[in-house]
Amino acid sequence: MGTKYILSKGELHRQDNSLNFKNSNGNNYIPIEGIDEIYCLDEVSFNTKVIDFLSKNNIILHLFNHYEGYSGTFYPREKYMSGKAVIKQVEAFNEKRELIAKAIVLGIANNIHEVLYHYYRHGKEELKEFLDWLKDEMPKKLENSNDISEILLTEADIWYRFYNSFSVFLREDFVFNKRVKRPPDNPLNALISFGNTILYTKTMGQIYQTHLDQRISFLHSPQERRFSLSLDLSEVFKPVIVFKTIFDCVNNRKLSVEKHFDKNLNYCLLNESGKKIFLEALESKFNETFKHTTLLRNVSYLKAIKYDGYKLLKYILEDFEFNPFSLKEKK
């Protein structure tokens, strides 16, 4: 099980039963054993032989443009298609959408609380007001939300307050005034946008291994993107994987504003060396294992995403209670 990142411009070819990525530095052979997905993070050309080869080996291909914008995903033919699961997922969308959406938003709030409580315990008392709001007022507000638009407003409020808390514990040169996505306008926005996109595509790869249909989502509108369920299931993992990695890279000075970002008038992006450092840290977080209190065995955060997919499927098919991943499940 693994991921291959291609960071530079070049050409991808099939060579016998393997792949060859050719760029200005020469040939780079990519053995496909153990590879689940390939990320092309710059302009890469390839032909249909490559696509056919990837499809036969069940390898997902994620494509990005030179400016770190997500272009799309080649998704091999569905392995786990189930008509019954699709019908039940549509029924759940019609009958239980608000319940599932509320569970996801509550999961986001709980994990943000756990992440920030670490800083509160280490002397950042300015966070107490937000932590109390997450624990006491937010759940009541969510419970009283009557439709999906009110649930989304509560979710937006959580993220807004979360971003505003960064000035309490992040290095000053990385603090920002507001979240800007397309394109990101400063180093912190660049890290959040890139990290969230990698998490979104990783979640896509985990859902691919279940009977869930990627197109039918609950918190986000199914019309939002083709793979909108990935947006739903990745939400509770953002504080745990993306933001914890960012906080570690920033506060431990693994990334520097001067050395690791390309800045222009209207945008700011990670440069190649910054991207390598951040991707290595993200991969390490995805593969970090912990003892799961329910499964009673060690699992990685990446597998925890797939496990959330199974939990959602069990709720849809058998009405078992759906509680997304919580950091409290970690022993």
Image (tube, rainbow, N blue to C red):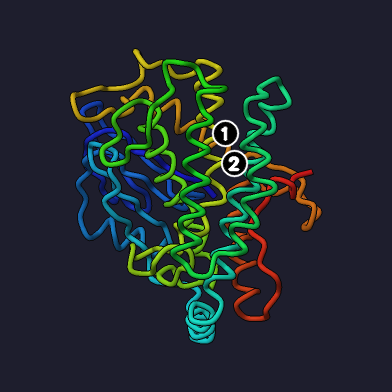
- Residue 130, how many percent across, how many down? 61, 37
Q: Is 91 situated above or below 199?
A: below
Could you say which disc has been placed on residue 240 in the image? 2
Residue at mark 1: 244
Residue at 53%, 30% in the rendered image: 165
Residue 312, image quadrant: bottom right
Q: Is 99 situated above or below 236?
A: below
Residue at 43%, 21% in the rendered image: 174
Check the image and name the residue furthest to the top.
258
Label 2 Cα crowd, 10 Å radius (few <14 / some 14-19 / many 20+) = many
Q: Amino acid at mark 1?
A: Lys
Q: Is residue 320 left or right of residue 75?
A: right
Element under disc 1: helix
Pick whichever, 190 or 128, lies toward us.
Answer: 128
Circle 2/circle 1 CB separation < 8 Å: yes
Pick whichever, 68 or 33, lies toward us.
Answer: 68
Label 1 Cα crowd, 10 Å radius (few <14 / some 14-19 / many 20+) = some
* Image quarter (top left, top right, bottom left or bottom right) of the C terminus: top right
Q: Is 88 situated above or below 279?
A: below
